[in-house]
Amino acid sequence: MIIDTPLIFEKSQKGCIGFKISKSTVPDTALNKFIPENMISNKGLNLPELTEFQVVRHYTNLSIKNHHVDKNFYPLGSCTMKYNPKINDSIALHPGFSLIHPNQLDSTVQGALEIYSNLEKVLLELTGMGAITLQPSAGSQGEMVGLLLMKKYHEDKKNKKKFVIIPETAHGTNPASVIMTGYNVRQVRSDSRGRVDIEHLKELIDDEVAGLMLTQPNTLGLFENNIEQISKMIHDVDGLMYMDGANLNALVGVAKPRLMGFDIMHINLHKTFSTPHGGGGPGSGPVAVNSRLKKYLPSGFINKSENNFYIDSNVETIGKVHTFYGNFGILVRAYVYILSLGNMGLKNIALYSVLNANYLKFLLSTNYEIPFSDGTLHEFVISAVKQKDKGIKALDIGKSLLDFGYHAPTVYFPTNIKESIMIEPTETEDKKTLEDFANAMISLDEKVDSDSDYLLSSPYNTPVRRLNEAKANRELDINYYEIQNK
Ligand SMILES: *Cc1c(COP(=O)(O)O)cnc(C)c1O
């Protein structure tokens, strides 16, 4: 196994080229006729020099080292790594979509505007909400946009609010978004059923509470079935209900967040609606709101006059949160996915993802501890406490799975379960894949007794073995300038 792949800059060889352009027939013109002298760089670009073939091989080899959902099962809990159908890409790459420019006149991009508008309609139907912005480019950005809307609502009403309540199982982006918006966090505990502890919530609610951020179903894959009571408690102090919609996969076509009392929510198109994610984007995290909050949405949304779509703005808006109107290519992919599934297909997302999670949970239940398992929807959390007692941690099991060619599940999150391993199979996996994975997990448990040294030194077949993960995160080794100056 080649561990040390040189950077493409290190592979550069003076004079190598991939492409020859014939001599220009346009007369040369000095650049400084168009660009001020002080803005022209004379340094050259310092790009690597390689043949086309070398570039293709370089990136193909890198892609093989990495794990991706086209390669094998990717049960990364919380992240909904479902299959991304290829038809999404082929339609998004149609020149009519991929070659248009956001500065074109509205009259020349009516089709694109119609797609925005239709996608908005479907998402509103599925969520029961009154208005939506497609601009945010991730769930986490959606959270911040949603919280800014919440803040604007309270400022307009001269409400003196300071806190947003978040369950202890929340995704890390939730508290981060709260702090960035200028609120502080109050953390509510989970009860013995893995849901929001209502008694503790009562203690936390007062007039300074701006709202509650709740993942529904929650991070343990459980439906917060006291949701109506919770919504009423928050609304009684004029707080707003924010739904982290990253788990919408379990609800699509089955339940509408607005009817549960949510006022604001984000949707991760790159999770629920099968657009690609990982590696930092581009994603898409539309934010849907109740009709009362519509006037605060970011400007630059699509409206329709008699027969023309046009781009509109809000007077009381929180501002703009993205260039133009969001990641168009991702929105097209989500829309294709929705159209290709149709009504019943959309509902089946929820039904099959719940079925798959429950089947897999059952297969694992003899060998692994499963603390909160009453009412599992689309994902579940097992615990490696039994294995830990014998010296094998959740981390070791995750690492050992890599040798089977699987991506490891999410480990040590949520934090209220010891040695947690969070598994989300998604609806796109077949029965055999789930059974093979379960067999791998079971064989690892059997090795805890028979060959624990094997588990402690795994993985054996990956490009790199055990990394110092804290160091790898803090000291990223990607600075190519340093390499150039070596
Ligand atoms: C993925 C996720 C987020 C953040 O969404 P991004 O699109 O990754 O920014 C927030 N909450 C939960 C529960 C998630 O699973």
Image (cartoon, grey):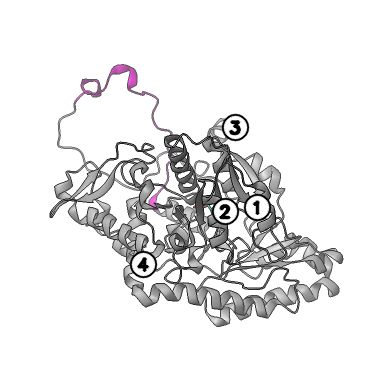
State how far apart marks 2 and 3 are (Cα): 62 Å
Contact (Cβ within 8 Å) of mark 2 with mark 4: no
Q: Nearer the viewer, residue 369 or 449?
A: 369
Name the N-terminal-most of marks 3 and 4.
4
Q: Which residue is mark 2?
A: 233
SS at mark 3 in the image: loop
Name the N-terminal-most of marks 2 and 4.
2
SS at mark 4 in the image: helix
Q: Which label belongs to residue 337?
A: 4
State how far apart marks 3 and 4 are (Cα): 48 Å
Q: Which residue is mark 3?
A: 486
Contact (Cβ within 8 Å) of mark 2 with mark 1: yes
Left or right, 284 with reference to 305: right
The question of residue 33 being in magenta is answered with yes
Name the N-terminal-most of marks 1 and 3.
1
- Within-10-Å neighbours for mark 4: few <14, some 14–19, many 20+: many
- Within-10-Å neighbours for mark 1: few <14, some 14–19, many 20+: many
Please identify, in this view, whether the residue under mark 2 or under mark 1 is nearer the observer.
2
Q: Which residue is mark 1?
A: 201
State how far apart marks 2 and 4 are (Cα): 37 Å
